[in-house]
Image (cartoon, rainbow, N blue to C red):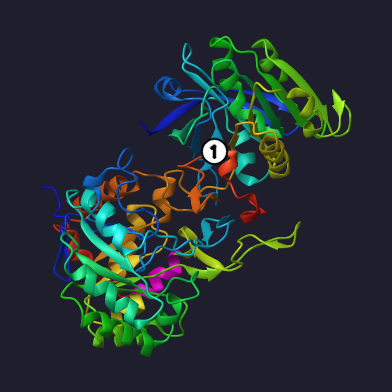
Amino acid sequence: MRRDVRATLVERRSLSPDASLMLFHHAELTGSVVPGQFTMVRVPGQGLLLRRPYSFCDMDTGSGRFSLLVKEVGSGTRALTRLPIGSEVDCLGPLGTSFAMPAPGRRAVIVAGGVGIAPFVAFCRRLQQAGHVATVLLGGRSSHDLYLRESFESFGMDVRCTTEDGSFGHEGRVTAILDESLDGDAELYSCGPQPMLLAVAERARTHSIPHQVSIERRMGCGMGCCLGCVVYTTEYVRACSEGPVFDADSIRWERDPHPL
Amino acid sequence: MTTPDTNVSIAGISMRTPLIAASGTFGYGTEYEEVSDYSAIGGIAVKGLYLEPREGCAPPRIWETPSGMLNAIGLQEVGIERFIAEKMPPLRDKGVAILVNICGSSLSEYAELARILDDVEGVSAIELNISCPNVHEGGILFGCDPVMAARVTAAVREQTRLPIIPKLSPNVTDIAVVAREVEAAGADALSLINTIPAMAIDVETRRPRLANVVGGLSGPAIRPIAVRLVYQTAQAVDIPLIGIGGIASHEDALEFLLAGASAVQIGTMSFVDPLVFRKTLDGLEDYCRRHDVHAVSELTGAMLAS
């Protein structure tokens, strides 16, 4: 059940010069989220209007805490990042679709770029609980952008990193190490910048590998009403309701060349 | 003091509160059921409908501006047939007035939609979309020309006994002229304003923020303009007005009522706060108690001289 709750900001961890992991407390909301889902967060601030969509990064039902990965890109994200600890924040959720587990005997290969790692922390926690070891390919411009790498390692995942400037891991784009990570058992999951998603989708299609993708879009309502967040499949469908997790093969990327 | 009377009646449509969910912001009326309080809602104006389903504009479709939202959705909708078969039945038992917003690419399409809706159980009124800025056929093309606006209204009038509520565009030289024309052509009430044509550009990429380039601006940013247009229209016509434009609180709703509206629509702000209807209604009731007003309807046009 979706609800609009007032969650308490309990902690902010700086992950890089411009990204933070923000931890909120709300036991009921935390307990109702499935990995891949998102929340619409109301950001207090002069002149700021619409809520911002954030994938749930991780949920800890024991402490009733959930986390969001926030990168400062504009006035809304800046205001959210600077909220004082203890602030009450309106969070609408859980919203949207979630990641399906890999089929029995198959192995998850996750490709994440920048803040696109967000939905995979909770998903890898779930994979670990189910006894899976996923391959996690993390990509960023520099080592600063490889957020929460240690979390994936702590879940026992096979983590491989690339940076465009070579400051950590393999130098280049994350898709450069994709082929060596694919075999007949792989099921792909991706989230990140659209060029990366396109490259992964092309590889998945070539090798007939199932591929679930989490799509980032600007959203007005998150409830399926404003039709602002659409993605083209056989028609325009809502990233907030039919997504954000889609079967990548259903998406006609060329209909949406400049999504953000 | 007893609870103030929040019932309003507009063109024969009885509503338990003067708060209506604005077309295009509340889907087909059921999307918000889990998180909104429908008991505070008097009516729902459903997403605009043509005869046939429409794909809508390419994305990006929305962009936030200071206290405002730019949109160019382009009336993505399911078509009248699917609306009646699938969307209308669950709406009938919500206790709210149902305003069906229609749009056509021709006079005959508006007329045909009205003819079809005339027989549909549960429809309270037809809201005539002659003001959408984001479609190339119909919409604002009809609303910016007083003669065309009147012809659409008359064409619909011939086909239905339902109350007709043309939704007016702010993008006109003199809204009073359009208002008088559609009143003479048989409109029972007016809703105003639709979004204000507007645009924004990403200077880094030099691309427009919206794929459609131009969109419609809504939200608190446009409210003072909307209040002024409601006030001017109230001076020009005798039929009741439904005020729209960035309402976020009971004070905002009150401005529209005092300027001459009999009810208001809330749109963009329900995205921000699904409980905006409940909070606004509570605030209106509290205001009535503090000001010794027995019925919200007493406030219509009750602004005092300067």
Magenta stretch prevailing secondary structure = helix
**Which quarter of the rendering shows the C terminus of chain B?**
bottom left
Boundaries of the magenta span = B223-230
Horizontal side of A177 relative to A216 (left or right) equals right
Magenta includes A114? Answer: no
Residue B81 higher or lower than A227, as above or below: below
Where residue B194 sits: x, y (%)?
41, 69
Residue B173 higher or lower than B262, as above or below: below
Identify which residue is drawn at 28% across, 49% down: B283
Q: Residue furthest bottom?
A: B147
Nearer the observer, B119 or A71: B119
Where residue A207 sits: x, y (%)?
69, 33
Nearer the observer, A65 or B299: A65
Kindly identify which residue carries mark 1.
A246
Identify which residue is drawn at 46% across, 58% down: B220
Q: Chain of mark 1?
A: A
Nearer the observer, B8 or B76: B76
Identify which residue is drawn at 74% across, 18% down: A159
Where residue A122 sits: x, y (%)?
56, 21
| Residue A158 image-quadrant placement | top right
Horizontal side of B174 relative to B184 (left or right) equals right
Nearer the observer, B93 or B234: B93
Q: Residue furthest left?
A: B2
Identify which amino acid the numbered label 1 is placed on.
Phe
| Residue B14 image-quadrant placement | bottom left
Where residue A132 sits: x, y (%)?
60, 13
Secondary-structure class at tag 1: strand
Residue B124 higher or lower than A176, as above or below: below
| Residue B115 image-quadrant placement | bottom left
Magenta includes B227? Answer: yes
